[in-house]
Amino acid sequence: MTNSLRAGVRRGGIELRHFLRNGKELFGHLTNVVVALLVAAFLGDDVPGTRIPMTHLVLAGFAAYLLFQVGLINLPQILVTEREEGALLRLRATPGGIPAYLVAKCLLVVVVAVGTLALLLAAGALLVDGPLPRGPGDWLTLLWVTTLGLLAVVPLGAAIGAVLPNPREALALIMLPTMGLLLTSGVVFPITMLPVPVQQVAAVFPLKWMAQGVRSALLPDTARTAEVAGSWELPLVALVLTAWTVFGFLLAVPLLRRAARRESGSRLSARRRRAERSGASASRGLM
């Protein structure tokens, strides 16, 4: 296990350096921050029943959603693409195998997500008077909520990536349920405005609890009146996110191992031939 961890950290460092050199991917994450700031900038009302600006609630919600997005949207797409390119096939001869691969992806996602979160909070505070933690206790809360939130969604994203079809279909299959959670988890408006059955469904998934934990770190205590229970419920936030973490790891490792076992040279060659034929057909269609 120690060797797998060491190999995973080394691999994660290499992947992080490649990411930082990829302008297209960096621009994509920057675009997400810009969209969040634009949405927040056009909100002028207060959260119903409080004196908290809606801008603050939305920025706190988007902070949680960007963490969720990196783990549950970006990561599965990366895994599907690498599977198509033969990465899982090569894992059979790679030191550490699947555990090291999963550690590397976790490291990459954590650094990207934390960087995106820091950029959003700093830009929000400078440009739209966004919220920041008010003391050491709030910074500590933001730290453990971010850590547990990422641990909850990264293995889940890896498990989803192991079973999704080709990269072209992956985004379409992920985006619809993710957008549904965005609208029902209290990210862009108070969750108490939603019907009770919708609140109950949203409470099953980690995004609702990630957003609630981030709000507790960024917003004053008076904002608790807009929560379903009238409090931040931080012990429950920790419990739910921990449960999703355990579930995700138990699901991700066997699914990735299964996907690696199913890979073969003939499967990889067949996918490449299909991709070449598809590219040739698209080129003829454009002529």
Image: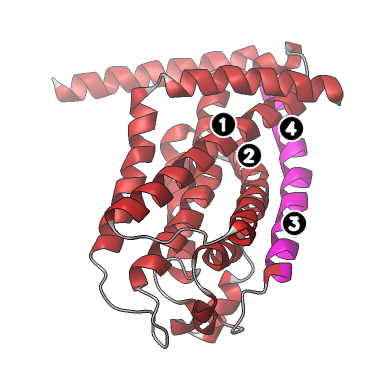
Could you tell me residue 1's position as x and y percent?
86, 26
Task: Kindly identify the residue that appears in the image at 47 percent across and 16 percent down.
Answer: 272
Q: CA distance from mark 3 to mark 2?
A: 17 Å
What amino acid is labelled 3 in the image?
A: Thr
Secondary structure found at label 4: helix
Q: CA distance from mark 2 to mark 1?
A: 7 Å
What segment is highlighted magenta in the picture? 235-264
Name the quadrant containing residue 142.
Answer: bottom right
Determine contact: label 2, label 1, CB under 8 Å.
yes
Provide the residue designation for mark 1: 79
Secondary structure found at label 2: helix
**Location of residue 247 with respect to 227 vertically, above or below:** above
Tell me the number on the disc at residue 152. Answer: none
Q: Nearer the viewer, residue 279 or 176?
A: 176
Q: CA distance from mark 4 to mark 2?
A: 13 Å
Q: Earlier in the sequence, mark 4 or mark 2?
A: 2
Secondary structure found at label 1: helix
Task: Kindly identify the residue that appears in the image at 16 percent across and 24 percent down.
Answer: 286
